[in-house]
Image (tube, helix red, strand yellow):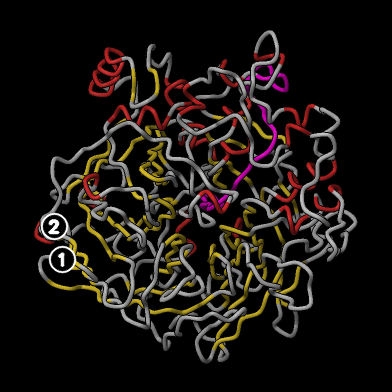
Amino acid sequence: MAKKDVDPQFQDPNYEPVVNESDNTPFASVLANRMKRRTLMKGGVGAALVGLMGGAALTIGGPDDRRGKGNGRAHLDARLGFAAVGVSTLNRVVVPEGYTAQTFVPWGTPLTGGLPDFLDDGSNTGADHESQVGMHHDGMHFFPIDLKAGGQDSSEGLLVMNHEYINQEALHPAGATYVNGARPDDEVRKEIAAHGVSVIHIKRDSDGEWQVVHGSDYNRRITGGTEMDIRGPLRGFSKLYTKFSSDGTRTRGTLNNCSMGPTPWGTYLTAEENWHGYFANRDQQRPKEQIRHGVGGASRYDWELAESGADEYVRFNASASGASSLDDYRNEPNTFGYMVEIDPFAPESKPQKRTALGRFGHEGVIFAPVREGEPVVCYSGDDSRFEYIYKFVSAQPYYPDTADGRLLDEGALYVARFNDDGTGDWLPLSLEDADFVARMNAALAAGRVGNIPFEAPFSSQADLLLNTRLAADIAGATPMDRPEWGAVDPASGKVYFTLTNNSRRSPDDTNAANPQGPNPNGHIINWREQGNKHDATRFTWDIFVFAGEPGTETVVDGEAVVTLDESNHFNSPDGLWFDYQGKLWIQTDGSDAPPYQNNMMLAANPRTRDIRRFFVGPVGCEVTGVVTTPDCRTMFVNIQHPDGHWPDADSARPRDATVIVTKDDGGVIGS
């Protein structure tokens, strides 16, 4: 996230080059007359969708669905009951009349250990920051404190949030510094500590105000230096051997954590997105598992240049400097790019990297509703231009009394192909699939996949998963316009994904699911799995809404199903979440120029496509991460990288923070 579609001259910390040059063009042609000025249309799909609209009803709807005992759809009410707010250029949060917004747990909030206070001059040490809430808040989830007992407490719980990246200018007294080309160790330690995840025990006090429960054993920081286990097919694989872990079973840290996904068994999966930029490989030749992800000769923050040369910092140098991988960190990048499972209720537990879900730029993960005795299914987008959408189906069935993260260690990984007739296929990424093997052999004969040399087959399924992006290229997946957050409609079972934007797609490189070239504003796509079974291998898809200026239309079968106006125009949809009432919340991370102004959050009724602007953030921010308490009466929204002196005008530094939104009458948010 974090404005990755800007020109590299702005030196965005999350800027990344296009690394998918596989020439995947699954469609011979695109839909005629699909785009006019201020009008975007997708036709010919509506009729194809009719046959699947009558699928079996899903017993899903509330937080207790994690037990596979859904409480049905009767209580869901996705109708919107607020007056939309206008766009804003103010350096404050704007919410509808009748609502109140207040900031909570900003970057640097004391959390663990000696509870070191935040110092506004940037002089907190690395050790301080390991005990403070991290920087650049992102995806998050609220876990009721009685979750493990099957409860839905809305007055106390664990707020778990990601910290995607950092602002070095704000983090240090005078930004990042160098001494004879080396970085001071404590600056590097502090930057690593500012990344990762915070687990924050919170509770409403007698006045109804939310407070951090200081001294709670649940409070925890997971950082870029926390030791973690490798799980799944890549555990023990030779390409994960390092000086730190000679058997490829351990690593240190999780980085660039963007979105997340709560599991059906009450744990938290955090996504490693643009991890590639943290490593430097200055070798003349780099392996394909680094080339395809964009690992280059310089790193984002120069952690490998720490003055002490300590092992915990030099590991970000991915060059082959030793006699073998056991003597250096050439394989360290191979231990990143996964979904990482954290149990917030077990503070002594070690995070687990779940490699069966693939290695790529995970934006997040979203689980389909679980049914007892059936596989667990989850979806993940690879947030980069021309990358893909993936699905994982567990090999073992779900049983609520025994389910845990081991369900994610064995199963089938698929990648999506969106056909131009409104149908789609899930393509297996498996050496046991004859079609995939045939395509791999064709790539071998050509000697390349796009611009990447391909001179030897994948040696094992572990090798394939290490190179998930390359395997998806070979399979023939549809290159998408930055697939980011996903969400599953608790009423219909449809899956929704944001496609944030793609300024680099040319007019002659479009496809039916990504029909704009270039695509500066993005759109939201959805699909229904065949037979309403999320483990199906076919689906039908449609475009829910095109983002854009007022007057932009989304047209299906000749009819405008959405026309954006002053109450709901937006660009660059990013965050996406269905609340427990069935409302769809859409967050943006795009242009803050007219007519859009500050980034925002909108609410949508997925059945009527009624979309209204609910929340506008302060100047320069991204609005990212949203969740409510189970009763839907308290909403938490994250604000990342505000530009101005927000939330405290008297502070020398802008601070990322969570915003608590409540309805003045105590009612349900958005209703």
Residue depicted at x 38% and y 70%: 582
Q: Quadrant of the C terminus?
A: bottom left
Is 180 above or below relative to 453? Answer: below
Please say whether residue 313 is visible from this viewpoint: yes
Q: Secondary structure at mark 1?
A: strand
The secondary structure that dominates the magenta segment is loop
Picture quadrant where residue 140 is located: bottom right
Q: Foreground: 27 or 168?
A: 168
Report the amino acid beneath label 2.
Answer: Val
Residue 309 in percent (x, y) is at 82, 27
Report the amino acid beneath label 1.
Answer: Val
Task: Name which of mark 1 and mark 2 comes first in the sequence.
Answer: 2
Q: Foreground: 282 or 479?
A: 282
Residue 182 in percent (x, y) is at 80, 35
Would residue 48 be found to the left or right of residue 573 on screen?
left
* Circle 1 residue: 556
View extreme (top): residue: 323
| Magenta residues, start to end | 242-269
* Circle 2 residue: 45
Q: Which mark is residue 53?
A: none
Q: Are marks 1 and 2 in contact (CB under 8 Å)?
A: yes
Is 264 inside the magenta-drawn segment?
yes
View extreme (right): residue: 114
